[in-house]
Amino acid sequence: MFDLIDCSAFETSATVATLNDFFFPVVLFAAIFWFLCEIFLDVSFETQSKMIDKQFASDGNSTYKDDTQKAGDDLILESLPANTAATIEEHNTKAKSFDVDTEYQNLKALGARKLRNFCRDREIKGYASAYNKRGLDGLVDFLSAKQISAHQIEQQFKHVETLARGH
């Protein structure tokens, strides 16, 4: 009585079924891959391609290469979080302003007692053998190798004096 709908009209052909079986996983993979790339990769493709083109350009002009390097560094700094970029800039300025001879003289001017007290308070291992072998010069060399500046030592003693006055 209700035989109005023929089932053959709703069947899919073998060709369509084969195409669906092949293309559905491929399209699904492409969509998921694109979505994950959008989430985890923050740099746009155009920016990367421009940077790559500039890096591999064979101009031969050194000023062009320097400009390219600066542009690449600026691009990298822009893509980093703000606090990381500030830390890198601070590190670069500290590295430029650090003078070994001046720092050596400043450490030597503090004297053996302050330097030894600083090392003892910070529990730096090896300072006693450096002092015993070469005296003040050995201790200054040891602290310079550990990248400890006279400013750090002075700050600690100011902090200790402030604490002593407060209590």
Image: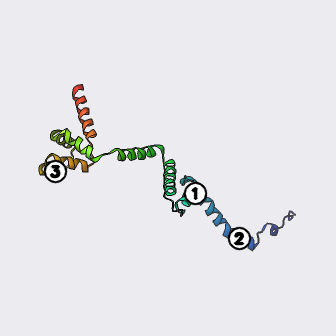
Alpha carbons under labels 3 and 2: distance apart: 78 Å
Q: Residue furthest top?
A: 166
Q: Amino acid at mark 3?
A: Ala
SS class of the residue under badge 2? helix
Mark 2 and mark 1 lie on one chain; the one further toward the N terminus is: 2
SS class of the residue under badge 3? helix
- Please give the label number shown on residue 130: 3
Asked whether residue 167 is in view, the answer is no
The image shows residue 114, relative to residue 141, as above or below, that is above
Q: Residue furthest bottom?
A: 14
Q: Position of residue 31 (x, y in %)?
A: 63, 59
Seen at 21% across and 49% down, the residue is 141
Mark 1 and mark 3 lie on one chain; the one further toward the N terminus is: 1
Q: Amino acid at mark 2?
A: Leu
Alpha carbons under labels 2 and 1: distance apart: 39 Å
The crowd level at tag 1 (other Cα within 10 Å; few <14, some 14-19, many 20+) is few
- Please give the label number shown on residue 50: 1
SS class of the residue under badge 1? helix
Q: Which residue is mark 2?
A: 19
- Which mark's residue is nearer the viewer, 2 or 1? 1
Alpha carbons under labels 1 and 3: distance apart: 53 Å
Q: Amino acid at mark 1?
A: Lys
- Please give the label number shown on residue 97: none
Q: Position of residue 54 (x, y in %)?
A: 55, 59
The crowd level at tag 3 (other Cα within 10 Å; few <14, some 14-19, many 20+) is some
Direction from residue 45 to residue 7 in the image, left or right: right
In front: 4, or 16? 16
